[in-house]
Image (cartoon, rainbow, N blue to C red):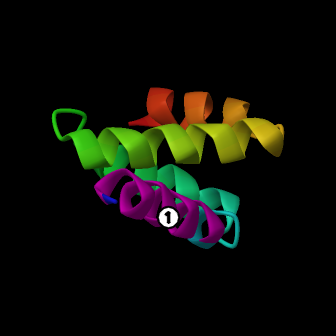
């Protein structure tokens, strides 16, 4: 039962992510902490979405600006 809820939560997060702009996704990505499991999942979903939009280079270029 808990696995089903976890999967549904990830799906809801993904549906929310796909509606965000590229810039907001990048900003959100850098604000997450990699040491938290739930935030790791969110980072992965953001990366997946940026990759599907062919915008992964925006993430890399914004990292070098910081």
Res 40 quadrant in image: top left
- Judge whether residue 9 is colored magenta: yes
Residue 50 part of the magenta segment: no
* Residue located at (58% from left, 28% from top): 60
Per the rendered image, the range of residues in magenta is 2-15
Identify the main secondary structure in magenta.
helix
61 w.r.t. 46: above or below: above
Q: Position of residue 35 (x, y in %)?
A: 16, 33
Left or right: where does residue 32 sit relative to residue 60?
left
Q: Secondary structure at mark 1?
A: helix
Question: Residue at left 65%, top 39%?
Answer: 48
Task: Name the quadrant containing residue 56.
Answer: top right
Residue 49 in picture, x, y percent from top left: 69, 47
Q: Look at the image and tell me in which quarter the C terminus lies.
A: top left
- Where residue 64 appears, as percent x and y from the top left, is 48, 26
Rendered view: 61 above or below 39: above
Identify the residue at image location x=40%, y=42%: 41
Residue with the mark numbered 1: 8
């Amino acid at each position: 039962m808990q696995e089903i809820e976890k999967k549904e939560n990830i799906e809801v997060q993904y549906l929310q992510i796909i509606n965000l702009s590229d810039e907001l996704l990048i900003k959100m990505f850098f604000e997450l902490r990699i040491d938290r499991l739930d935030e790791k999942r969110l980072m992965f979903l953001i990366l997946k979405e940026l990759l599907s939009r062919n915008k992964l280079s925006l993430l890399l270029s914004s990292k070098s600006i910081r």
